[in-house]
Image: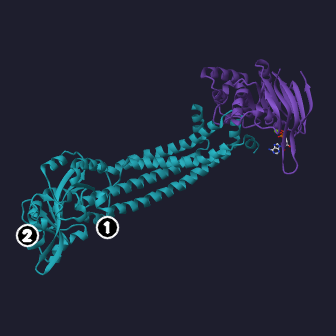
Chain colours: A cyan, B purple
Amino acid sequence: MNTILKMAWRNIWRNKRRTILMMLSIFIAVVLSLFTRSMQKGTYANMIANTVKLSTGYIQIHKKGYWDNKSINETFVETTKLRNLLSGDKNLTLTLPRLESFALASSGKHTKGAVIIGTNPKLEDSLNHYSKKIIKGKYFKSNDKAVLVSDKLAEFLQLSVDDTLVLIGQGYHGITAAAKYPIKGIFHFPIPQLDNQLILMPLKESQYFYAAPNRITSISLMLNNPGNEDKTIIMLRGKLGNNYEVMPWQDMNREMVQAIESDNVGGIIMIAILYMVIGFGVFGTVMMMTMERRKEFAIMIAVGMKKTKLLTMVVWETVFIGIVAILAGLLVTYPLLLYLFYHPIPLTGDLASYMIAFGAEPILPFSLEPNIFIIQTISVIIISIIAVLYPLSVLLRFNVLKAMRS
Amino acid sequence: MSIITTNNLHKIYDETIVPVYAVNGISLEFDKGEFTAIIGPSGCGKTTLLNLIGGLDQPTKGEVIIDGTNITQLKQTEIIDFRLKNIGFVFQAYNLIPVLTAKENIEFIMQLQGIPKKDRDKRVIDLLEAVGLKDRMNNRPSELSGGQQQRVAVARALASKPKFVLADEPTANLDSKSTNNLLDIMLKLNEVEGTTFIFSTHDSRVMQRAHRLISLEDGKVQQDQKIK
Ligand SMILES: Nc1ncnc2c1ncn2[C@@H]1O[C@H](COP(=O)(O)OP(=O)(O)OP(=O)(O)O)[C@@H](O)[C@H]1O
Ligand SMILES: [Mg+2]
């Protein structure tokens, strides 16, 4: 066996230039795909993090059935028990209770439907940095009896800081909710569809407004490690029981899941094409390597080498080429990606300003997800297997005498 | 006691309409310790006969019996194993594995046979000494002359102590000096180790040194003479 390995290793270096070219082509494929995949996955993770921050968090807890009809009646009380349960989990970096519902916002002749978010100003700010989005007036405090209004909505209602806003809606169990609030600040929300309908209110005040004391519609959770999302969900479902629904962002934001999936498929296809091209090259070279050595193989078999041993040798040759190429690819790429993971590429220009407006850092982040590396390794192994199929089939049908005569 | 017997051996190639009788009814016996040359004009069937005896080719008719085993009845995998254990081969060219050194080439066959390392080492050195290449044992075939390569091939053929060695024109690519040198070595091994050699040749100088001459024509034995 040892000798077989030794022969395989030496065989691949008989034609150094060809072998190096073959390795180089695999190497380049590995580096390119690791690089692009890492960037894609990094961008997705960043996009997800930015989006869930602005909306639902990675996971949201609701009363069972809330998500389907989003009614103010499907609220629940944030009990101490619930709070303790959540504060005990290490993967949760932030738990944010909100009371969200609809109301008509009006001032003078103008009326418009609005989304009212009752929230904890401090926690909300640590997540969304609303205080930095304030363009007029001030950010609010938890005992304020005032609201923050989004930019476009204020413009539509022709209101400014210190003006009074009238809200009319339906409260808990059909009670009419109506009140007047002074506007403490006006903020710009990066998503246009929401910028013309958002109103922020201290949680306590919103519970009073909707006549739903202590009740909330959701608890949004941010995670230390989004990769552990599934585990956390299973844990929460187990502990919370049937009265609650624990939803991952994927269930609440299907559009983003689909956008990412279709982009991801595009990336995978690109890499598949790259690997196919490389694969053909390797296949052709391995085929040549076999054809050239027919006489040699014939003599080896004639003197008593079993075909299986010969097959093993040829397989090892391809495996060695693959291993060297993939190791070189990993060795070169991993440190680079590691660096880029901690020092993402800063973006400039329009894209950067768009991202800043969206509330995201203008960076091109990279991912070090183990899957990226595993999949490239598997791809190279598959290429090697395909490339070695032809020599194997040649050897299996090998006719010693014919080969010796040729 | 003969170690090889061929009974009414035929190899017929049905080339298009005209069949080629490459070997056309050959019955021969070879004894242990023989040093036999098979001669005859090009196309008379020397290679075909050697291939049949070595189990590299299947006869159309007849049989080859080696030390009591009818090898024409062995399965493909059995025959490879049989060759490994019983027959040494030397071909005209491309004998050696290019990526192995002289020493490794000789050792390789013994490894395939499963001979332990310690025994291998001694045998390899002995053989290299016998073929006069001990100082070149760490060179690869490409670093050896044609004659040296053939000497390594002879050493390799003997490595596993086969019942006999078949050599198809082993000197065809060698100059006269190398040819003589190779024959000296073969004869010495024939004497010292008692190895049976059966080889084909075109070269009259090689024929002169054989102990038995079998000449073929059109696939038939024309003459079979013992010289010594
Ligand atoms: N595979 C084959 N198909 C058809 N005919 C063949 C085949 N192999 C050998 N022959 C024919 O069989 C005959 C004997 O060939 P063989 O190679 O045994 O001759 P040889 O005595 O070794 O000749 P040389 O001295 O040139 O090596 C020749 O006529 C050859 O053309
Ligand atoms: Mg011949």
Using the rendered image of the protein, determine whether residue A79 is visible from the camera's viewpoint.
Answer: yes
Q: Left or right: A97 with respect to B37?
A: left
- Residue type marked 2: Tyr
In terms of image quadrants, where is residue A197? bottom left
Q: Nearer the viewer, residue A314 or B56?
A: B56
The quarter of the image holding the C terminus of chain A is: top right
Residue B38: x %, y % from top left: 86, 32
- Residue type marked 1: Asp
Mark 1, residues whose alpha carbon is within 10 Å: few (<14), some, or many (≥20)? few
Label 1 C-beta lies within 8 Å of the nearest ligand 1 atom: no
The quarter of the image holding the N terminus of chain A is: top right
* Chain containing mark 2: A
Residue that label 1 marks: A350
* Circle number at residue A287: none
* Chain containing mark 1: A
Residue that label 2 marks: A181
Q: In the displayed structure, would residue B67 be above or below residue A48? A: above
